[in-house]
Amino acid sequence: MQRARRIERRSRKQERLEARVTPAQKRLIERPAALRGTSVTEFVVASAQEAATNAIRELDVLHLRDEAREVSINAVLHPPPPSDTARAAVERYRKRVSL
C-alpha cells in the first residue's frame, strides 16, 4: 500500500473514477480509512491500485503457466531429432551393456 501512495503522489492526477455504493459498503470503507488517517478517496484509490497490481501479477503467472504447459506438451509430442552427440552416447551405452 505504501508503494501505491508513493506512485500516486509523484504523478499528476487528471483522471476521475466514480462508484455507487450502499450505505453499508461506505461505512465499511470509511472505517479503515479513518484508522489509517487517510481520506476515503485516498484509501479507495490506494486499495484499488494494490488490488489491480495483484490481479495483473496473478493473471501473468497463470498465463506463463499456460505457455509453459504448451511448450512442455509440444516438446513431448514433437521431440527434436537426436543430435550426433546423443546418438554417440546411445552407441556407447549399447556397447557397455551388450545390447
Image (cartoon, helix red, strand yellow):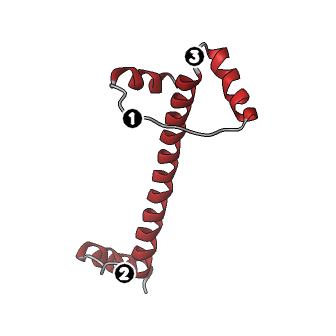
Q: Which residue is mark 2?
A: 95
Marks 2 & 3, CB-CB < 8 Å contact: no
Q: Residue at x 40, y 69 (%)?
A: 71
* Other-residue count near label 2 (Cα within 10 Å), few / some / many at <14 / 14–19 / ≥20: few
Marks 3 & 1, CB-CB < 8 Å contact: no
As measured in the structure, the alpha-carbon distance from the residue carrying label 3 to the one carrying label 1 is 20 Å
Choose between 62 and 90: the one closer to the eye: 62
Coordinates of residue 58 in the picture (x, y in percent): 52, 48
Q: Which residue is mark 3?
A: 38
Q: Which residue is mark 1?
A: 15
Choose between 23 and 37: the one closer to the eye: 23
Q: Is residue 19 above or below residue 78?
A: above
Q: Is residue 17 left or right of residue 93?
A: right
Determine the secondary structure under disc 3: loop
Q: Nearer the viewer, mark 3 or mark 1?
A: 1
Q: Residue at x 37, y 27 (%)?
A: 13
Coordinates of residue 47 in the picture (x, y in percent): 56, 31
Tag 3: amino acid: Thr
* Other-residue count near label 1 (Cα within 10 Å), few / some / many at <14 / 14–19 / ≥20: few
